[in-house]
Image: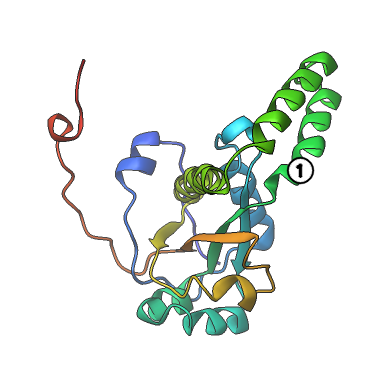
């Protein structure tokens, strides 16, 4: 049994985060806990709350072996991690608007008349939205949930690494998804670090910020 140290220390979560290259392969994350991590991550904001993010959790040895051929330069991370979370943006996320807004009324988060007004306005907007704009919006939202997921993982005592180097043109179909519908965002390895991550330099605030 491994002692996984959880924390609510925000400074430790954010300032202690590192991109981890090697994991303890004996540490496994239960699907129950992984579901809890994902549930917390999905509290991230999204455009008009349409939540375009979708996840494929690759935690079996067979699944990771398959992925290792699509992420050859990151094979060691993939195979030693507890799991790899493939994050996608769903280009048909608008299909869930009825469920999202009706459930909000049912739970008492908004009155029905507000729901009707918002849904009408959103539908008119989405009816004329160019596909490139929809894609940009969904990719941005999926990026937000990805960062939140990595921070939630830290709070649960795990470490992560965001990976952009993999066969994005193949990954959806390999895991049974429609490649035209699901846009690959990134892979996130997750597990218990077997070695400390490296410190990295960050540009100072005065370099990256303009005040007006």
The residue nearer to you, when weighing 92 against 207, is 92
Q: x and y percent of residue 69 in the render?
A: 48, 85
* Residue 191 appears anywhere in the view: no
Q: Assess disc 1: are there few (<14), some (14-19) or many (≥20) residues with their C-alpha within 10 Å of its C-alpha.
A: few
Judge from the rendering whether residue 177 lies leftward or rightward of residue 68; answer left or right: right
Disc 1 is placed on an element classified as helix
The residue nearer to you, when weighing 139 against 61, is 139
The residue nearer to you, when weighing 92 against 73, is 92
The residue nearer to you, when weighing 75 against 26, is 75
**Residue 46 sits in which quadrant?**
top right
Query: Which residue is painted at 57% across and 58% down in the image?
Result: 88
Query: Which residue is painted at 28% across and 62% down in the image?
Result: 196
**Residue 175 sits in which quadrant?**
bottom right
> 57 above or below 68?
above
Judge from the rendering whether residue 52 lies leftward or rightward of residue 117; answer left or right: left
Protein image colouring: rainbow
**Residue 113 sits in which quadrant?**
top right
Please tell me how many numbered marks the rendered image carries.
1
Which quadrant does the C terminus fall into?
top left
> 166 above or below 198?
below
Query: Which residue is painted at 75% across and 21% down in the image?
Result: 109
Q: x and y percent of residue 95 in the render?
A: 76, 45
Q: Label 1 belongs to which residue? A: 96
Which quadrant does the N terminus fall into?
bottom right
Q: x and y percent of residue 16 in the render?
A: 31, 47
* Residue 65 appears anywhere in the view: yes
Q: x and y percent of residue 53 in the render?
A: 60, 50
């Amino acid at each position: 049994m491994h002692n996984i140290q959880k924390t609510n220390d925000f400074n430790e979560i954010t300032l202690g985060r590192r991109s981890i290259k090697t994991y303890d392969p004996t540490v496994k994350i239960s699907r129950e806990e992984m579901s809890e991590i994902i549930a917390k991550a999905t509290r991230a904001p999204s455009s008009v709350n349409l939540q375009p993010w979708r996840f494929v959790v690759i935690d079996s040895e067979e699944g990771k072996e398959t992925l290792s051929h699509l992420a050859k330069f990151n094979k060691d991370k993939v195979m030693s991690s507890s799991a790899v979370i493939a994050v996608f943006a769903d280009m048909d996320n608008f299909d869930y608007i009825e469920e999202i807004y009706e459930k909000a009324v049912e739970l008492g988060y908004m009155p029905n008349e507000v729901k009707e007004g918002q849904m009408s306005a959103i539908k008119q907007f989405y009816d004329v939205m160019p596909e490139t704009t929809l894609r940009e919006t969904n990719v941005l939202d999926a990026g937000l949930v990805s960062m939140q997921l990595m921070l939630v993982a830290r709070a649960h005592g795990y470490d992560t690494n965001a990976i952009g180097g993999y066969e994005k043109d193949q990954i959806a179909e390999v895991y049974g998804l429609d490649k035209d519908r699901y846009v690959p965002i990134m892979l996130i390895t997750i597990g218990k670090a077997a070695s400390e991550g490296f410190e990295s330099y960050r540009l100072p605030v005065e370099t990256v910020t303009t005040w007006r």
